[in-house]
């Protein structure tokens, strides 16, 4: 049994095949994280920085919308983010067994055809083509190992 059974974080990497009907199993630990958070649901959109699909709770998406409210209503930066994020966002719906259909348009944008890798990222998750994720994980490990990407200083009191 996993140490993180009832965590509200999206953890680990889960690779699953897309079946003949275009469905995939949404990872049980991710469903648990959503349940622990008492979330209203999950939203997906094309990543702005990676060849992946971003996934997050509806509540996290509201946080992003609130952060954008701090920008001037007609600021080009705000319009870009709103268009890129909210213009392509779609709800992820899964059944009682965790099966879901990922939006075909999103899958095509990130070259996913037969298998998906769900990458936990703490408060959010991503969906990758498995070989692309393997390459990115190697790049990330190398960048950290060489010090090219330093770890941020943790706030006082964090255990």
Image (cartoon, rainbow, N blue to C red):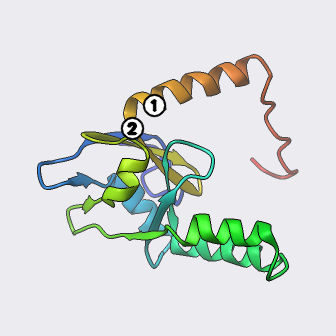
Q: Which residue is mark 2?
A: 129
Q: Distance between the Cα atoms at labels 2 and 1?
A: 5 Å
**Compared with residue 131, is residue 13 higher up or lower down, i.e. above or below?**
below
Residue extending furthest bottom? 73
Q: Nearer the viewer, residue 87 or 137?
A: 87
Residue at left offset 51%, top offset 42%: 51
**Compared with residue 96, is residue 109 higher up or lower down, i.e. above or below?**
above
Q: Nearer the viewer, residue 150 or 70?
A: 70
Circle 2: element type:
loop
Q: Position of residue 62 (x, y in %)?
A: 62, 77
Evaluate whether residue 10 shows in this view.
no
Q: Position of residue 139 (x, y in %)?
A: 61, 23
- In-image side of 49 versus 137 (left or right): right
Q: Which residue is mark 1?
A: 132
Circle 1: element type:
helix
Q: Position of residue 92 (x, y in %)?
A: 37, 67
Q: Please say if the residues under marks 2 and 1 sit with CB atoms less than 8 Å apart.
A: yes
């Amino acid at each position: 049994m996993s140490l993180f059974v009832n965590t509200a974080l999206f953890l680990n990497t889960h690779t699953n095949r897309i079946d003949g009907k275009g469905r995939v199993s949404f990872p049980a630990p991710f469903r648990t994280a959503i349940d622990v958070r008492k979330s209203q649901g999950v939203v997906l959109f094309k990543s702005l920085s990676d060849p992946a699909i971003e996934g997050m709770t509806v509540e996290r998406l509201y946080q992003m919308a609130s952060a954008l409210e701090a920008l001037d209503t007609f600021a080009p930066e705000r319009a870009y983010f709103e268009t890129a994020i909210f213009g392509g966002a779609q709800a992820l719906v899964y059944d009682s067994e965790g099966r879901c259909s990922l939006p075909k348009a999103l899958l095509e944008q990130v070259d996913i055809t037969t298998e998906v890798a769900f990458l936990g990222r703490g408060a959010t998750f991503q969906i990758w083509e498995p070989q692309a994720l393997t390459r990115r994980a190697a790049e990330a490990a190398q960048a950290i190992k060489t010090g090219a990407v330093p770890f941020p200083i943790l706030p006082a009191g964090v255990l």
